[in-house]
Amino acid sequence: MKKSKINLKTKDKIMHHAIHEFIEHGYHGARMQNIAERAKVNKALIFYYYTSKDQIYKEVLGRIFKTIFERLNNLSDEPTSVENKVRQIVDVYMSVLIDYPDYIKLMMYELSSGANTVKELNPFGALGMPFSPMGGKIYSFFDGKIRAGEMKQVDIIQLIISIVGQIIISFIGLPIIRTAFESNKMDFDIKIFLEKRKDFIVNLVINGIKPEEKI
């Protein structure tokens, strides 16, 4: 058992430094030797855990989706309002991107490169994907609320894309947003900004999907 823990810790360390190598040099420019030097391990040890650079890259990207999907699927099944569920989704995404700030950088690189690895991994077709129309936990929640008349008849996939898109752009644009604040002599505190952003996204979404009042 002790050996297993040590191996897991070493593998996680390799993964952590591999992310930085891929961000700085891209997939094609990244080198296994550089990852080994960053992680302060022998190159042979990397090949003990991973057969190739391609395998490391796929596992890094896969971990991003796995982390988010697991947290979404772990949300409580207790009955709740549409507003609370939207807030929970926003909380999950923001907490992941705050806990793992390099994820957004790596995903930007993957997208700018054509997202071929994500297409190959196809995380959105995986069993238990929370947004799947085929019984996904989040999709089913919104579908139930639409049927119950607690929200407008909206395209659920478009709704999810809108929620996630607003969250991601908030992180991608942070350097520019900070500059805009400071250029106008406005204080910029990232924690305060993200809390305000969270509330704004939730309110914007809810105002767009709440059912119209009957006259």
Image: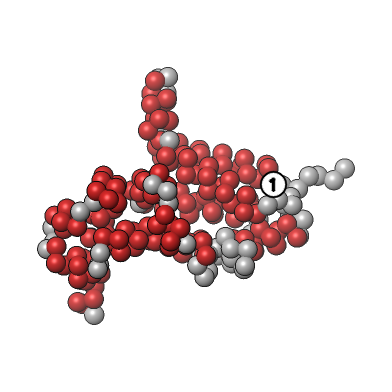
Q: Which of the image's four quarters has the C terminus?
A: top right
What is the x, y in percent for residue 76? 55, 65
What residue does disc 1 label?
209
| Residue 45 in the image: above or below residue 167 | below
Residue at x 71% of width, y 47% of height: 210
Q: How many marks?
A: 1
| Residue 139 in the image: above or below residue 209 | below
Amino acid type, callout 1: Ile
The reply to whether residue 67 is visible in this rendering is no
Residue at x 50% of width, y 44% of height: 167
Along the line of sight, the residue nearer the viewer: 89 or 33:
33
Residue at x 27% of width, y 50% of height: 28
Residue at x 42% of width, y 25% of height: 181
What is the x, y in percent for residue 14? 22, 60
Q: Which of the image's four quarters has the N terminus?
A: bottom left
What is the x, y in percent for residue 35? 19, 55
Give the left or right position of residue 122, taking residue 206 as reference: left
